[in-house]
Image (spheres, helix red, strand yellow):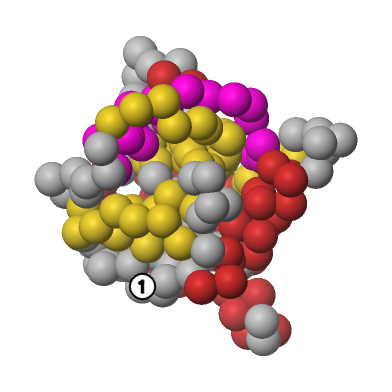
Amino acid sequence: MGGSNLDGFRQLELIKRIKALADTGLIYAENGYDRERYEELMNISLQLMAHTADRPLAVLKDFFMPANDYPTVKVDVRGFVLNEADEILMAKESVDGKWAIPGGWADVGDSPSEAVVKEIYEETGLTTKVVRLLAVYDKKCHPHPPQPFYIYKLNFLCKITGGKLRHGFDMQGAAFFRLDTLPELSEDRILKSQLEHLYQLVKNPDSHVYFD
């Protein structure tokens, strides 16, 4: 990765931090003077974010609801599933037409393991059970394309228990792939280096949970 791209990633992470500070300030502001300053800081952070992440400012303003509580990290859950041929279960995203291991945002009310099992079923038609947690990735520590959200990615090893392979209504496909013949990846969701890492963790019986 070139230096300019790395600088862009660092800039976006700093902008996210500024926005989080503005969110917190707006929650705890005790007078109009402080609130006005934090609102200005919020607007500046959104303008910078729109420029750095190449997203329309109006879209960002619509997405980010006014914070009513301390701002926290978004959680993405992913299921790493192997078949008997050691092929990796993947789903084709409708958003970009590329592939990722099944998963998505964890819903309020679901435990992480419940969330990942649900995502796998909805995207691929297969029922699974969670075997163990493999890795917790902080997205900023990996070369994903820039985006305006701060995300932790929880990656679970899951075992197939039933179902029939078919893609969900909001997906374009579901299939198994060998690690050395992967399709075009949706790098906003998963990277080849992460798939290789997760595979190694599965195959090493002495491996511990990885975390950034």
Q: Which residues are magenta?
A: 115-136
Image position of 156 (left or right of 197): left
Nearer to us in this view, 60 or 155: 155
Residue sitting at x 64%, y 30%: 133
Name the residue nearer the viewer: 207 or 4: 207
Residue 199's place in the image compared with 154, above or below, is below
| Residue 120 in magenta stretch | yes
Q: Amino acid at mark 1?
A: Asp
The x and y percentages for residue 200 are 73, 51
Q: Position of residue 183 (x, y in %)?
A: 42, 71
- Residue 82 seen in this snapshot: no
As drawn, 28 above or below 157: above
Which image quarter is the C terminus in?
A: top right
Q: Nearer the viewer, residue 105 or 18?
A: 105
Residue drawn 40% across and 41% down?
103
Q: Establish if 208 lies above or below 48.
A: above
Where does residue 139 sit, x and y in percent of width and height?
58, 52
Query: Residue extending furthest top?
Result: 109
Say if the magenta span includes residue 126.
yes
- 123 and 211: which one is in front? 123
Query: Which residue, given by chain and number where applicable, does mark 1 sit on?
Result: 54
